[in-house]
Amino acid sequence: MHLHSLIRLAGALACCPVTTAIPYQEYILAPESRILQPVSVNSLNGTVRNADALLDGGRGMASLYGRSSVTCDFGKNIGGLVSIDVAGLVGEPADPKVGITFSESSQFISAESSDGQSDGGRGEKVFLNVTEAKGRYTLPKDRIRGGFRYLTLSVDLEHEEDSIQLSGVTVYFTPVPHRDPRDYTGYFHSDDELLNRIWYAGSYTVQLNTIDPTTGESNFGGRTAQGTYTWSLNTTVCESDAACLVDGAKRDRLVWPGDLMIQAQTVAVSTNDMVPLRDSIESLFVGQHGNGMLPYLGWDFQGRKHGYVSFTYHLHNLITLAHYARFSGDTEYLADKWPAFKRAIEWSLSHVDASGLMNVTSNRDWLRVGMGGHNIEANAILYYTLNLGSELARTLNDTIATTNWTVHAERIKQQANALLWDAEANLYTDNETTSLHPQDGNVWAILSNLTYDHHQPSAISSALRSRWGPYGAHAPEAPGTTISPFISGLECEANFLIGNAVAALDLIRLQWGYMLDGEVMTNSTFVEGYSTDGSLNYQAYREHSRISHAHGWSTAPTYLLSTYVGGIRILEEGGLRWRMEPMVGDLKRVETGFSTARGRFTVDIRADGLGHIQTSEFCSPQSTQGTFLLPQAGWLYQGKRKVSVQAWKQTGSLPGGCWHFKSRDRS
């Protein structure tokens, strides 16, 4: 079904009970109004009087004297365009102006510069010239700041008794420009408050990354006399009447396939905001080269196509397309992109050598090092994508074109295990020339089912868990002591796939709990990466303040909690087929749901805290059908119908509507 048809279907469903207001809206971090004011004063320097006047609900005027500054705290990471209200000037200051700097983390607050957007150094201070004694002054559109929690206002007046009086500072919230940011179609709630907050922080992170297409990141103009770097947001990064979905709110503000692969699923279970996702995918596919290679990233800083080669991100493009088609049901768009998909697969297969494995000749990936040769991550992703492509081919009735894909996939699985499996370490090596056991390649081996027997995945999971530290999972394939939320999110998913929900939830609580509540974090969005000691030292960057604190690839727990813990698995065409397979781990209560264009899917689970479900209520649109795979025996009821359920044995296909499950222990 085409997306526009599904959108019309969703509109037709608007009168029905499935579109009633979602619960737990109090957790949504997106603002109710686009006009935002700070909620507290973080710090003062110099002589500043009545700084509280700048806060939401503040009265009177704040006066900044001589050389002074005030740092305002908005309470969470936001993005938008800054305005100040000038109430008056005291004295006769020459060339009066207010300096403005930004920071996502409290660690990088400064009155002289903003946190970095380039790797060269920190960002320049911007100014509003106060040409009249009274009035509102607004930064130009290209000075939208995509991500910041802290805003510092400063003055540098010649005489200490001179001052600029301000009656207010506001930010016009610019993310999600095409719709109400609080228009959620999904929700999550459990008896673990930390997990609840993590779900909504992940969704809000993606919302900050949903931007006006004309406000992508531009090329940096260079180093200023003060040693900072100029910045502006004025590049068109996709063609859309709605918005683009980029990697990070502050930077890069470009469409990256790796981030999009994660964000596609986060969007699906939270806001169902599919148009920006589709348009961002389109911006990547228009960059496909004649040889079939898909781009490493979207438009570059100058708005031109580039020739960067990445064997992994090339495939992430294809996986993201499949996620979009699965959740949206837009098979017409999938069919339109199918020739490009096949050309892209052939480009990857053209690099398979006599060993049967793909020989990687470019080091570009997610900022890890050592990518090359018969790399386990790249080959596991290729194996995954070949099998995924074969499934899509069946949907599109084009199985002839994929005959050799299965042959290549079988050979990759055989040779990866023969050449790269280290039985002593219970992990795969990065390639034949190193003893490094990467996090990414081993995680992808589980995700892709590259392993040969059921013992390997559990062994890999245990070996990876042994490397966890107090702040999360170390990625030894990255520089130094890197923790990568991108790869750790995939590790969580790998644990769910092998039925180890406890390990998955443990890592989410450990790593995302720190990213949410750590003192140097935004306490509202998820950071791009950091160090094993918890510091904001992402060693791929020279300039630590460059780290993005609202990064799309860090949001995997949002979709994992809905689709694995809640168990709502969308299999094809927007939920035309589904599977209900909850993995609640140590939780006793789980409620979650989300909508596709076909309608709403919801589940309400009661469990014993040991992984056993006592009762559950699962509802899906009437026009759909699916199966149940539950951890213990019991019965499913729908009206007068009663279906027996065996533990870990999938039921036959059942119609949509609401089904009530009761375990035999409670019968």
Image (cartoon, rainbow, N blue to C red):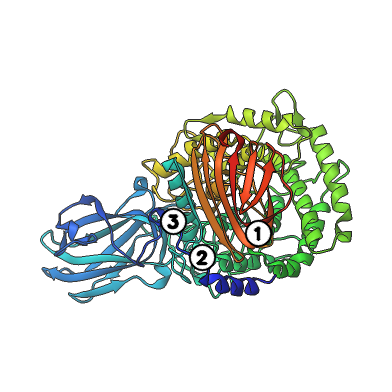
- Is 349 located above or below residue 474 in the figure? below
| Mark before the other along the chain sequence, 1 or 2 | 2
Q: Which residue is rendered at x = 27% and y = 54% of the image? A: 71
Looking at the rendered image, the disc whose residue lies closer to the viewer, 2 or 3, is 2
Q: Distance between the residues labelled 2 and 3?
A: 14 Å
Left or right for 413, reference 658: right
Q: Which residue type does callout 1 highlight?
A: Gly
Q: Which residue type does callout 2 highlight?
A: Pro
Looking at the rendered image, the disc whose residue lies closer to the viewer, 1 or 2, is 2
Q: How far apart are marks 1 and 2 (CA)?
A: 18 Å
Q: Which residue is rendered at x = 19% and y = 67% of the image? A: 167
Badge 3 crowding class, 10 Å Cα cut-off, few under 14, some 14 to 19, many 20 or more, is some
- Is 596 located above or below residue 490 in the figure? below
Q: Name the residue under label 2.
A: 17
Q: Distance between the residues labelled 3 and 1?
A: 21 Å
Quarter of the view holding residue 274: bottom right
Q: Which residue type does callout 3 highlight?
A: Pro
- Is 209 located above or below residue 96 in the figure? above
Label 2: element kind = helix
Task: Report the disc number at residue 391.
Answer: none
Left or right for 244, reference 416: left
Quarter of the view holding residue 338: bottom right
- In front here: 308 or 608? 608
Can residue 535 be seen here? The reply is yes
- In front here: 109 or 286? 286
Badge 1 crowding class, 10 Å Cα cut-off, few under 14, some 14 to 19, many 20 or more, is many
Label 1: element kind = helix
Q: Where is residue 293 in the image (x, y as percent from the top left)?
A: 75, 60
Q: Name the residue under label 1.
A: 575
